[in-house]
Amino acid sequence: QLQLQQSGPGLLKPSQTLSLTCAISGDSISNNIAVWNWIRQSPSRGLEWLGRTYYRSKWSHDYALSVKSRIIISPDTSKNQFSLQLYSVTPEDTALYFCVRGDDVDTATLDYWGQGTLVTVSS
Amino acid sequence: SYVLTQPPSVSVAPGQTAGITCGGNNIGGKSVHWYQQRPGQAPVLVIYYNSDRPSGIPERFSGSSSGNTATLTISRVEAGDEADYYCQVWDSSRDHVVFGGGTKLTVL
């Protein structure tokens, strides 16, 4: 059974960098079918996709335009995990963050979700 | 950008059928996925590729899509179906995942 285990700090100050990690068990981050996403949820913005990474002979990335200038999603094949870094956070980045596996790069079916990490940005 | 529109709320009596709509420009030409989110939990995929059910999802859940509207139908609604439901597509023009705003299903 595939499981996604999230870790990372839940409290940040404005201008800091949000860093979360998602450890994968029951699948390989390097398989040629899966897509690895970060999604967040807040009352004001609902479910908001942030970006994804996937391997198809090489690593590829797609990022949401709303965060494209300050986001990096990185695979770590040695640890079978992937991470999210979001730079220069503001209170508007306060949200519940999920790592999510997708099983189709063209239609973005999201079939396994992590437990979620509440991140609060406050001075 | 591509926009998906859902009604904020739908109410239904137990045993009746609930229909939750998701509107989008030519959504019938895309693959629509639906998620159920109970309070305090992560979303769960209940319908993918418009009408397919993952293993473990009851047959009471079904989906359809045509023209500018996709619909999630829940037959013989139970109290445990009370949750928020989200539709989702891939916007290939911008390489983005797009979610609807969500619909709160209340079982009366």
Image (cartoon, rainbow, N blue to C red):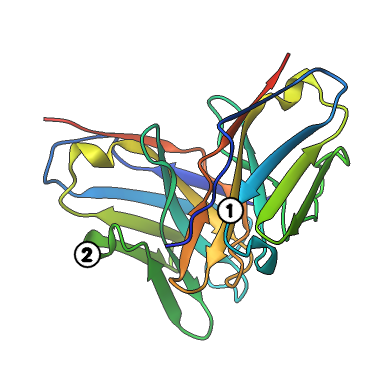
Tell me where residue B14 appears, x and y as whole percent.
83, 18
- Would you identify the image quadrant in which residue B52 lies? bottom right
Q: What amino acid type is highlighted by mark number 2?
A: Ser
Tell me where residue B93 appears, x and y as whole percent.
47, 74
Which is more toward the observer, B45 or B95? Answer: B95
Q: Is B73 on the left or on the right of A13, as rendered?
A: right
Q: Nearer the viewer, mark 1 or mark 2?
A: 1
- Disc marking residue A58: none
Which is more toward the observer, A64 or B26? Answer: B26
Q: Is B40 on the left or on the right of A69, as rendered?
A: right
Is residue B54 visible in this depiction of the protein?
no
Q: Is B36 on the left or on the right of A6, as rendered?
A: right
Q: CA distance from mark 1 to mark 2?
A: 24 Å
Q: Chain of mark 2?
A: A
* Local SS, label 2: helix
Tell me where residue B44 appears, x and y as whole percent.
64, 42
Q: Are marks 1 and 2 on the same chain?
A: no
* Neighbours of disc 2 within 10 Å: few (<14), some (14-19), many (20+): few
Q: Chain of mark 1?
A: B
- Disc tally is 2
Q: What amino acid type is highlighted by mark number 1?
A: Gln
Which residue is label 2 attached to? A69
* Local SS, label 1: strand
* Residue that appears at 70% across and 61% down: B67
Which residue is label 1 attached to? B88
